[in-house]
Amino acid sequence: KKRIAVMTSGGDAPGMCAAVRAVVRAGIYLGCEVYGCYEGYSGLVKGGEYLKKMDWEDVRGWLSLGGTLIGTARCMEFKEKWGRLQAAKNMILRGVDALIVCGGDGSLTGADIFRDEWPSLVAELVKNGTFTDEQVEPYKHLTIVGLVGSIDNDMSSTDNTIGAYSSLERICEMVDYIDATAASHSRAFVVEVMGRHCGWLALMAGTACGADSIFIPERPPSSKSWKDELKEICLRHRSKGRRKTTVIVAEGALDDELNPITSEQVKECLVEIGLDTRITTLGHVQRGGTAVAFDRLLATLQGVDAVKAVLESTPDTPSPMIGFVDNKVVRRPLIESVKLTKSVATAINEKRFDDAMKLRDTTFKE
Ligand code: F6P
């Protein structure tokens, strides 16, 4: 029986539990044994109880849950060669040679490096006497499949990452709450949202909530004029009878000289035009709560495809990343997608902002 391990890694995202559930059940349905790797890559490094066989019933009720019930971590040991050697040993001890990772670009890059290194790790485990040639014979090749779980929606080659729409929903709920009090007092609110270096959450939330203005890294305003423009826009909206002002700032917002645009700076502008202004930094509530229907479906469809991708993989196929493009589940070469994602950061650093916007993904197109 093929043995597959599934893990969640990096920041948690609603829908990760649904993804694990789908992998476990599709795996069992297709004749495999599935192991849950607890606490992300540290579970691989620790082995033993951290690599636990999962049955159909173990994931009952997981479809809608937020967070990840198999835990996640940002693991330093796996970045070291000894950590990966330990991980390879623990996998072979469990008879596992396929790994489905649900995480962001950093976690998926780590997985692909592990796959490239796998033959040399196995050879080393033979050389140092941990295993014999016969014992490692069935484990000559490691299969890696990536599922993108992140609230940031920052991965290129896929329209959506698992968790992004749940987070967007949470942000919109919060902005709606804020709107009620803002309008009551005729106040201005600067709402800072997550997304790391990606402006997707801010852009979508600002559009869905009818914000007066939105600041994102991929479409930076002029360093010389953004403050005056912001003031002019907000005053114009007020002059038309609007009783509240809402400005959404992505945590990674920049101006066109790559200076950060902070919530404090935005607040100062609003105070200067006479608005009673508060800042709300939404923080980790954006990652909490149950998964919205879209993320449950996305995670389920992708989890099933990840198992199929494991079963269809050969040593010559590049590790796939399961994505979602134009409402279809697609497989993309993992490493190409990671490269494309990194090229967005390069484009921003080189001030090629139009390229950055296009490279993000199709939902970002103007
Ligand atoms: O990548 C997900 C994310 O929530 C980002 O939006 C945010 O910048 C970061 O993780 C926060 O990380 P931590 O939970 O480690 O504070």
Image (cartoon, rainbow, N blue to C red):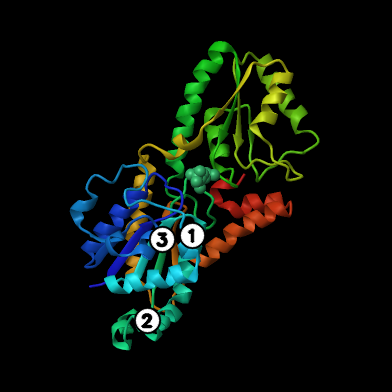
Q: Nearer the viewer, residue 175 or 51?
A: 51
Instruction: Find residue 51 and report its horizontal and vertical position in percent.
Output: 29, 62
Question: At label 2, which amino acid type do we have?
Answer: Lys
Quarter of the image for residue 6 reads bottom left
CB of mark 2 near ligand 1 (< 8 Å): no
Foreground mark, 2 or 3, reads: 3
Give the labeled residue for mark 1.
76
Query: Most extreme residue toward the bottom, as rendered?
Result: 133
Q: Earlier in the sequence, mark 2 or mark 3?
A: 3
Residue at x 66%, y 35% (from the top left corner): 262
Image quarter of the N terminus: bottom left
Residue at x 40%, y 38% (from the top left corner): 288
Q: How many numbered marks appear?
A: 3
Q: Earlier in the sequence, mark 2 or mark 1?
A: 1
Task: Say above or below: 256 vs 332.
Answer: above
Q: Earlier in the sequence, mark 3 or mark 1?
A: 3
For the residues labelled 2 and 1, say whether their Cβ atoms are less than 8 Å apart. Answer: no
Query: Which label belongs to residue 41?
Result: 3
Query: Most extreme residue toward the left, as rendered?
Result: 57
